[in-house]
Image (cartoon, rainbow, N blue to C red):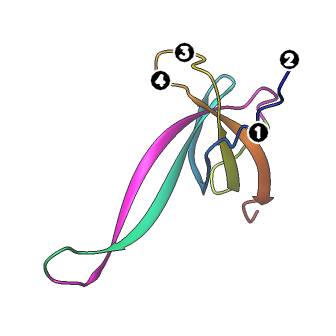
Amino acid sequence: MTEEKTVHKKTRTGVVVSDKMSKTAIVKVDRRSPHPVFKKVVTRSKRYYVHDEENKLKVGDRVTIVETRPLSKLKRWRLGEILQRAAG
């Protein structure tokens, strides 16, 4: 009996903040949520190390990243697609 499982991998959208490493970029992802006491919308950000096989990302690019198996100590995400190139 072979069953096909549908795997829904997590995706995030963010902006490239560093591309200085070989085949790796750092993407900053912002999320907005209300403060539990004051109810003001607060922006929280997190930096993800992303695998970029072809070194085509530049600082300022808006990208989608997809969760993947661990590739190194810090890299657990890979490049999904480039949504918008940085100006210039």
In this orientation, which residue lies closer to the viewer: 39 or 21?
A: 39
Q: Are marks 2 and 4 in contact (CB under 8 Å)?
A: no
Query: Circle 2 — which element?
Result: loop
User: Which image quadrant: the C terminus?
Assistant: bottom right
Pointer 2 or 1: first along the chain: 2
Q: Is residue 18 left or right of residue 86?
A: left
Q: Are marks 2 and 1 in contact (CB under 8 Å)?
A: no
From the image, state whether disc 2 or disc 1 is nearer to you. 2
Which residue shows up at 86% across the image and 20% down it? 2
Mark identifier at residue 67:
none
Q: Is residue 8 left or right of residue 46?
A: right
Classify 10 Å Cα crowding around label 1: few (below 14), some (14-19), many (20 and above): few
> Marks 4 and 3, how far apart in space?
5 Å
Residue under label 4, please give it: 74
> Marks 1 and 4, how far apart in space?
26 Å
Q: Amino acid at mark 3?
A: Ser
Query: Circle 3 — which element?
Result: loop
Which residue shows up at 82% across the image and 29% down it? 54
Residue under label 3, please give it: 72
Which residue shows up at 69% across the image and 55% down it? 61
> Marks 1 and 3, how far apart in space?
26 Å
Pointer 1 or 4: first along the chain: 1
Residue under label 1, please give it: 6
Where residue 76 appears, as percent x and y from the top left, is 56, 28
Mark identifier at residue 1:
2
Which region is colored magenta?
38-55
